[in-house]
Image (tube, rainbow, N blue to C red):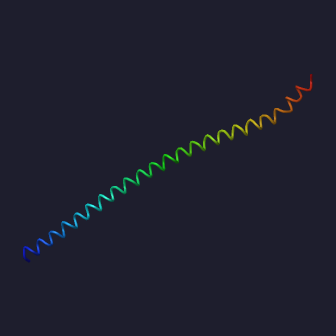
Amino acid sequence: MSNGGGDMSDERVIRLLEEIRDLQKLHVENYKEAIRNQQESIQMSKEWQTQANRRTRGALLGIFLVILAIYSLPYVLRALFRH
């Protein structure tokens, strides 16, 4: 094998290694983006869960107050009509 052929093979190896390096850089960037998206998704999920918990507590409090009012109504009416 001559030096000319060896140089050509070296150039191919260098190009291949550069390609591998570039692909690894791209992979790392894509991975970072995926992690950022995942963190954003987790944060949004936590916010939605917090909002859902607040709505649920509000609805339960409302239901409790309606039930309390319904059961209290006969006592209130009796007290009003006694006098």
Judge left or right: residue 52 versus residue 61.
left
Residue furthest toward the bottom?
Answer: 1
- Is the residue 28 above or below the residue 49 in the image? below
Residue 43 horizontal/vertical position (percent):
49, 46
- Is the residue 63 above or below the residue 75 in the image? below
Residue 50 horizontal/vertical position (percent):
56, 42
**Quick one: quadrant of the N terminus?**
bottom left
Residue at the spot 30% in from the left edge and 62% down from the top edge = 23
Residue at the spot 11% in from the left edge and 71% down from the top edge = 7
Q: How many marks?
A: 0
Residue at the spot 7% in from the left edge and 73% down from the top edge = 3
**Quick one: quadrant of the C terminus?**
top right
Residue furthest toward the top?
Answer: 83
Residue 40 horizontal/vertical position (percent):
46, 48
- Is the residue 1 above or below the residue 64 in the image? below
Q: Nearer the viewer, residue 8 or 1?
A: 8
Residue furthest toward the left?
Answer: 2
Residue at the spot 65% in from the left edge and 39% down from the top edge = 57
Judge left or right: residue 71 versus residue 15.
right
- Is the residue 79 above or below the residue 58 in the image? above
Residue 60 horizontal/vertical position (percent):
69, 40
